[in-house]
Amino acid sequence: MKITLNKALALDKMLRERLNDMKRLRSEASIVKTSTYLSRDLEEKQEPTYDIKMLDKRATMLQTAIFELDAGVKEANAKTEIEIEVNIPFLLSPLE
């Protein structure tokens, strides 16, 4: 799929946000917290609310996509040249 650099950067940002959501879900998916007013205890049970393997697989897919986007943007930047009309040696020379 060919996309513009701007679209790639926007997609990269969205994928990173989604990956953070998936990581949060993965860490919270296996714990269900319940409390009772009588005992004042907080009880933690290991009851999966999402399939941990599926969450891990999706997170890995997102990480791979982010890598591919980053690599593509960096490759495009490495090939792109710009032309500027300034005298860099003069601008960076010391004051006399």
Image (spheres, rainbow, N blue to C red):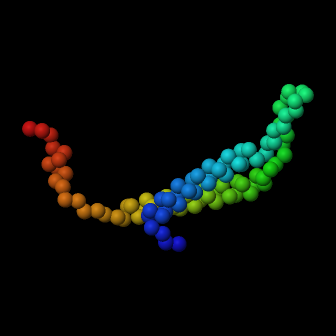
* Residue 80 falls left or right of residue 88: right
> Looking at the rendering, which quadrant does residue 94 occupy?
top left
Closest to the observer, 12 or 37: 37
Q: How many marks?
A: 0
On screen, 33 above or below 18? above
| Residue 58: x %, y % from top left | 68, 58
* Residue 15 falls left or right of residue 28: left
| Residue 56: x %, y % from top left | 70, 54
Residue 45 showing in the rendered view: yes
Name, please, the residue furthest toward the bottom. Answer: 1
| Residue 62: x %, y % from top left | 61, 58
Closest to the observer, 89 or 4: 4
| Residue at (88, 32) in percent of width and height | 36
Name, please, the residue furthest toward the right. Answer: 38
The quadrant in which the C terminus is found is top left
* Residue 2 falls left or right of residue 31: left
| Residue 51: x %, y % from top left | 78, 54
| Residue at (71, 44) in percent of width and height | 27
| Residue at (48, 69) in percent of width and height | 3
On screen, 29 above or below 4? above
On screen, 49 above or below 39? below
> Looking at the rendering, which quadrant does residue 6 occupy?
bottom left
| Residue at (56, 56) in percent of width and height | 14
